[in-house]
Amino acid sequence: LDEHLPETWRASVSVTSHDASKWGLYEQSAYDAILLDAPCSSERHVLQDPKALALWGPARTKHLAVQQFAMLAAALEAVKPGGHVLYSTCSISSLENEAVVERLAKKRSGRYEEIPVEAPFSEELSHGRIILPDTAQGKGPLYFCLIRRIS
């Protein structure tokens, strides 16, 4: 963290080693904001690493989407009402991106709201935004969606 955060922010940041899918059980309504950079299929790495390519496939993507939903739901329980979760992946799969947020909207309707975000080089999706390498000077992919806990 020392390499990435300004010194004045470090005291406000905590790192945990909990099972992220059960996080809301450990620390309910404890945080103002959470960045959830969820494990994903990471297609950019798949292209660069033969080991990652060997693991990649539709079954893995489906499995990751289930884990991602559990982590997102838990993170939203860990933030205080009015708090925010920034959900992100480095996947281009809609199953791991918009579908996770859509599932949350259906299963936990009225408890959370999506907050619109503008970001350079990003494209709007049904839920959230994505930055793709072809439109962002080689950066990405990066999917993100900002969600506020209402109750």
Image (cartoon, rainbow, N blue to C red):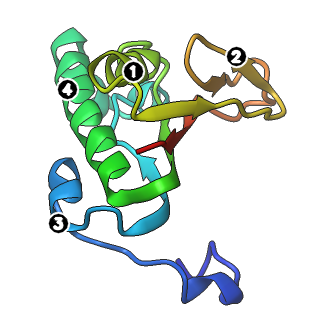
In this view, the residue in front, 148 or 66, is 148
Q: Residue at x 43, y 67 (%)?
A: 31
The answer to whether one can see residue 134 in this image is: yes
Q: Distance between the residues labelled 2 and 1?
A: 18 Å
- Residue 147 in the figure: left or right of residue 52: right
Residue pictured at 22% horizontal, 58% vertical? 23
Badge 3 marks a residue whose secondary structure is helix
Q: Which of marks 4 and 1 is nearer the N terminus?
A: 4
Q: Where is residue 19 in the image (x, y as percent from the top left)?
A: 16, 57
Query: Compared to 52, does 126 lie above or below?
Result: above
Q: Position of residue 71 (x, y in %)?
A: 27, 43
Label 2 and label 4: CA atoms lie apart by: 23 Å
**Which residue matches tag 4?**
66
- Above or below, 128 against 27 in this view is above
- The residue singled out by tag 2 in the image is 124
Element type at mark 4 = helix
State the CA–CA distance, disc 1 to disc 3: 23 Å
Mark 3 or mark 2: whose residue is earlier in sequence: 3
The dot on residue 26 is 3
Q: Which residue is drawn at 73% across and 30% down?
A: 138
- Reading the image, the residue beneath label 1 is 105
Instruction: Tell me which label, 3 or 4, sits earlier in the chain.
Output: 3
Please say if the residues under marks 2 and 1 sit with CB atoms less than 8 Å apart.
no
